[in-house]
Image (cartoon, rainbow, N blue to C red):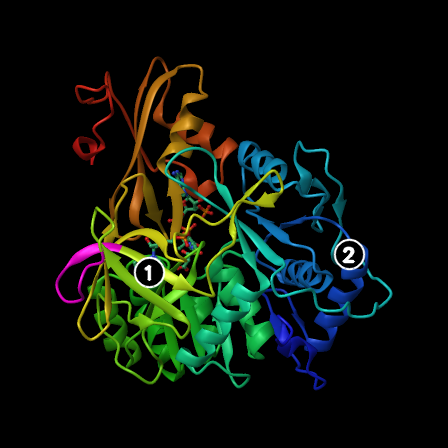
Amino acid sequence: MTRLLDALHEPADLADAVRDAHGALSRHQLLGRAAALAAEVAGRRMVAVHAEPNLATVVAITAALLAGVPAVPLPPDAGELERAHVLNDSCAELILSDDPAAAGASALPVMPVSTPRTPGDVPAEPDPSAPGLVLYTSGTTGPPKGAVLSRAALAADLDALATVWRWTGADTLVHGLPLFHVHGLVLGVLGPLRLGSRLVHTGRPTPQAYAAASGTMYFGVPTVWSRVCSAPTAARALRAARLLVSGSAPLPVPVFDDLVALTGQAPVERYGMTETLITVSARADGERRAGQVGLPVPGVETRLVDDTGEELPTGDAIGHLQVRGGTLFDGYLRAGRPEPSPAADGWYATGDVAVIGTDGWHRIVGRASTDLIKTGGYRVGAGEVEDALLLHPRVTEAAVVGSPHPDLGEQITAYVVADDVTAADLVAFVADRLAAHKRPRVVHLVTALPRNAMGKVQKNVLR
Ligand code: MLC
Ligand code: AMP
């Protein structure tokens, strides 16, 4: 197998290999800085990276991967509760960050990323089966779980995407997505470092920043594309791009149509999740269909099963989507080690409900559980937000649902039984404990929650 960040090791330098809103690093500068930091990180069991959307995060993640030390990116705005959970659960030994306050209330040491260091040798490549990243992601209940992604899975997915998107060293990838999830980090940073394209990170994914960046490929979640379409001048500036890629949540058909009208090209939609990486996509040189996410990428198989686990035929049947292939995670982290993946026979149940046409095209119909909310492309577990609300001394009951939102897809909506507290107090209370995007947008203060005869909250009534 080649090295995970293969293109980073190419002898030819590449000016502006990685650019953020404040500056740029050439390929050799990035490799030099990351190798020097890797020498100090080597031998640790796990390092956390305070994942602000900037060059320091790219250097820190690269250093950990060069050192063969699994990296766990921390949302930079994670509240205390979430930060403490991720740091404890992952058994991270230190935090890589230029911000000395990045440890928050934890006692972990913070190692600066951007201080000058003597250049170090590039360490030998670890075994492909070794863990590369641990990405924390929400389940329906409880705090987020750390999905362990092997170096081999990361490499397999990026190579599959290189094939289906014709992604090469001639590309300049532009995005402004967060660097602690699959979309912005795995595809958006490791992709360019493996495949050799330039990366422009715009800091935030605004239409104006995208228009100014002159890329050949652009990544965005549907909220980003919807905002691009609301800024027609910016949208028209993307006409010269080779590929506009949407994912992480369903792209509404009107946004697909507006992109066609404004940019002269249909977006490529692709589907994936933290635990499986990107498994289904439209092709750069093939058809693109509004409301459909395409065909399995090379090396991935998909199937639908019914409620009893029986495989369904392709065609009109709606079923539970399962995926199998080399891009799957190793399992969730427990006590510092991955638990075996919950995949049976290699098939992983995505929790998404889908239709697979006789021509192999996939349409995602929705999620089986209402307790996973997708807001602005972020996956948020209702249970985690409910648990945070219940920590408030004046809250006696809380139920959280995703309600439709024109810009974010879904918005976090909380129904709360509480005395003598305002909705704004509760929003601020959650924001202190969890990442900002997990705050409820709407809080309904109610006298009771609707419950069924078993006492279970009837979320379908709330929705
Ligand atoms: C937000 N705000 C609130 C609030 N929630 N204010 C009060 N109460 C609340 N409840 C504030 C924000 O802090 C911000 O303030 C302002 O309102 C606008 O917030 P917003 O509408 O959420 O927009 P924005 O911050 O611009 O974020 C939109 C976004 C973001 C699209 C840029 O959601 C995003 O980056 N999404 C990407 C998620 C992602 O990468 N997912 C990939 C997962 S991996 P201020 O002051 O800051 O402006 C995956 C696999 C795969 O899914 O398939 O890819
Ligand atoms: P995450 O773990 O944050 O990566 O979220 C994964 C979930 O995002 C999937 O299980 C889907 O529900 C959703 N998702 C990702 N891409 C798409 C897409 N193109 N269309 C519809 N849903 C998507």
Residue 268 visible in this rendered orientation of the protein: no
Q: Main secondary structure of the magenta part?
A: loop
Looking at the image, residue 47 sits to the left or right of residue 182; the answer is right
Which residue is located at x 44 percent, y 80 percent?
163
Q: Nearer the viewer, residue 294 or 415?
A: 294
User: Is 117 contained in the magenta span?
Assistant: no
**Marks 1 and 2, how far apart in space?**
38 Å
The residue positioned farthest toward the right in the image shown:
118
Which x, y percent locates residue 398? 33, 24
Quadrant (top left/top right/bottom left/bottom right) for the N terminus: bottom right
* Residue 428 versus residue 354 in the image, above or below: above
Which residue is located at x 54 percent, y 31 percent?
81
Quadrant (top left/top right/bottom left/bottom right) for the C terminus: top left
Which residue is located at x 35 percent, y 36 percent?
382
Numbered disc 2: secondary structure: loop
User: Is 318 contained in the magenta span?
Assistant: yes
> Which of the 4 quarters of the picture holds residue 208?
bottom left
Which x, y percent locates residue 242? 40, 82
Which residue is located at x 50 percent, y 56 percent?
178
The magenta-colored residue range is 311-320
Amino acid type shown at disc 1: Pro
Q: Nearer the viewer, residue 435 or 44?
A: 44
Residue 222 is labelled as: 1
Residue 42 is labelled as: 2
Amino acid type shown at disc 2: Ala
Looking at the image, residue 101 sits to the left or right of residue 53; the answer is right
> Which of the 4 quarters of the picture holds residue 57?
bottom right
Q: Residues within 10 Å of mark 2 (few under 14, many from 20)?
A: some
Earlier in the chain: of badge 1 and badge 2, it is 2
Numbered disc 1: secondary structure: helix
